Amino acid sequence: MRVVTRNLIEALQKNTDLEISVVSSLKREVVYLYLSRFAEHIIKKNVYLYELDPLLNASMLKLINSINKRRNVDIIHLFFANHPLFFLYGKILKKAVIIQHFGNPQFNLLKSIRIPKGIDAYITTSSETGYFDELDIKNVHKIKPPIDTNTFKKIDKIKARRHFGLSEDDFLILYMGGLNEIKVPLEFLMTIKDLLRGRRKILIMGRGECDYAQKIQQLAKKESIDMNVMVRTESLNEEQKALIYNAADVLILPFSEEMGLYKHVAVIDPPITMLEAMSCGIPVIAPEALSIPDVIKDGYNGFITHPGDFKMLKERITELIVNEEMRRRIGENARETILNDFSYEKVALNMKEVYDKVLNND
């Protein structure tokens, strides 16, 4: 979620004349997530401790007040914050307040904190807005997450693979994202294991949940495919992420069918890894879930499968293995999709239009 926030701020700064001040709790958030014994439970419940930190909230309110005295703030744009508190503060100051969400996975949060109905506008990156309807929220705007197309672009594949010590001759399948039984089910690996022979390999680049990474490695060893299954849990910066996408022949999102019940799963909608890979011109195979079908047109700029249908996913991977021209064509179309709909310029313009409507009471 912080990726979308950071990208949006950069997009607005580079492509509009808006004056933007940023008040962030990021450093405190990192401390909580690393030190709290209850971090896993907290994440599943979509609640972060820093929202309940009175000292942190007080310091942020003090900073906002200081900025307002110097610049006379027009809009307070909230991301993941203590929405009722900052909404009340904004209204006391007689400022417009906007709240941004990142798709249906935040529905439980939206419901539990009882966000006031007086919010001037809600913004969501998802094309699905049914959960707003359930709460009778009408002033909703759909703004796609911005992608830095100057960073995430085509890079020489050999150069990219050498950077990570990967073979230049393998067909490389890539998964990048959270490691858990919903996003990378063990059943998926069992289904495609006969593909993972010889020069065909999969790189699973994950975050956190090292125990689950070990489960994947244990299964690979048991099935004698451990030489073809690579699991890494390192953190990458933006340039490294662009390189790893370019090192791959295809990016996959092998979500289980339980993704249909994904309100408890931390995922941005649409998935940022999918958009970044597409921006690099890499074919993507993703499930018919979240807002993915609104981005990927099957056979044109990627492939769509049914969640949990790993046989279908295997067939699509096989098609890309044997058809290099298809890989090239789909990759080019994927890049064009991101340039047209998700670029900094496009998203910044759409966001500024929302700001203007709020300030003009349209």
Image: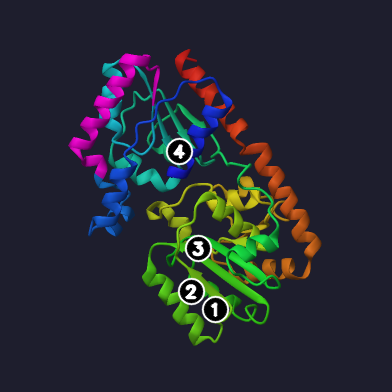
- Any mark on residue 265, and which? none
Indicate the position of residue 179 as horizontal and vertical percent values: 44, 64
* Discs 3, 4 touching: Cβ within 8 Å: no
Position of residue 140 measured from the top left corner of the image (x, y, whole percent): 47, 30
The quadrant where residue 88 appears:
top left
Identify which amino acid the numbered label 3 is placed on: Glu
Q: Residues within 10 Å of mark 4 (few under 14, many from 20)?
A: some
Residue range (magenta): 50-76
Label 4 or label 2, whichever lies nearer to me, is 4
Q: In the depicted view, which residue is nearer to us: 192 or 309?
A: 192
Per the model, the C-alpha gap separating discs 3 and 4 is 29 Å
Which quadrant holds residue 133?
top left
Q: Is residue 11 visible?
A: yes
Q: Is residue 69 magenta?
A: yes
Task: Say which residue appears at 30% left-offset and 59% top-offset.
Answer: 40
| Upstream in sequence: badge 3 or badge 1 | 1
Image disc number at residue 5: 4
Amino acid type, residue under disc 2 in the picture: Leu
Task: Give the spatial CA distance, label 4 vs label 2.
Answer: 32 Å
**Residue topped by disc 3:** 257
Q: Is residue 129 visible?
A: no
Q: Is residue 60 above or below residue 109?
A: above
| Discs 4/1, front | 4
The mark nearer the N terminus, 4 or 2, is 4
Disc 3/disc 1 C-alpha distance (Å): 16 Å
Is 143 magenta? The answer is no
Residue at the disc numbered 1? 190
The residue under label 2 is 186
The Cα atoms of the two marked residues, 4 and 1, are separated by 37 Å
